[in-house]
Image (cartoon, helix red, strand yellow):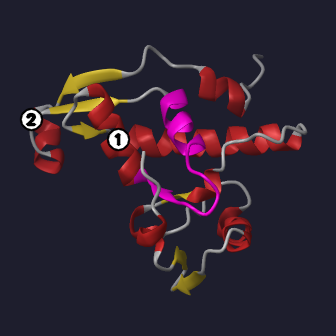
Amino acid sequence: MSKRKSWTEKLKNSKDLPKVEKITDKLSKRWGTGTVVIPAPMEVNEMMRRVPEGKLITINEIRVALAKKHGATIGCPMTTGIFAWIAANAAEEQRQMGERDITPYWRTLKTGGVINPKYPGGAEAQKKLLQKEGHTVIHKGKKCVVTGYEKSLAKL
């Protein structure tokens, strides 16, 4: 039986990415026409790492920056979200191994300033980290949302 890959190994496995592909007819109904960049996991991680303390970013901002970097119409929403999740878990894995300079994944939000409950520790753990950096987090139904997150968006 093969050993499971660590989150850090998954993060470093680029799988022949990044790739820019034409948006197919099937996907054009959802994404429009043009091209889509499927980023490498490390590219998503590098963008997440650039967000300084007190600042925030959303997955959509990362997608826009990736599209611009690769000359594509859009950044792939699926892979960008998955790779952000892998980056978050790799950072937590590294923190548990004693590393201090980890990717500040808690600063990467979903659309609308929503905290990603799938990141390590869930929404409550991230809420604490964000509050420590001066952000206000409120509960909207089952979601945790950073109020006024737009004012704190980092420039990528």
The answer to which quarter of the image holds residue 54 is bottom right
Per the image, is 83 magenta?
no
Q: Residues within 10 Å of mark 1 (few under 14, many from 20)?
A: some
Q: Earlier in the sequence, mark 1 or mark 2?
A: 2
Near-viewer residue (124 or 44): 44
Residue type at mark 1: give it.
Ala
Which quarter shows the C terminus? top left
Label 2: few (<14), some (14–19) or many (≥20) C-alpha neighbours in 10 Å:
few
Residue at screen point 56% across, 36% down? 45
Picture quadrant where residue 50 is located: top right
Please tell me which residue is depicted at 28% across the width and 36% down the height of the picture: 67
The circle drawn on residue 49 is none
Residue 149, position as x, y percentages in the image: 47, 71
Would you name the residue on which mark 2 appears? 25
* Mark toward the viewer: 1 or 2: 1
- Using residue 82 as the reference point, say whether residue 125 is left or right of it: right
Q: Which residues are magenta?
A: 41-59
Q: In what element is the residue under mark 2?
A: helix
Which secondary structure lies at badge 1?
helix
Q: Amino acid at mark 2?
A: Asp
- As drawn, is 63 to the left or to the right of 53? left
Answer whether residue 58 is magenta in the image: yes
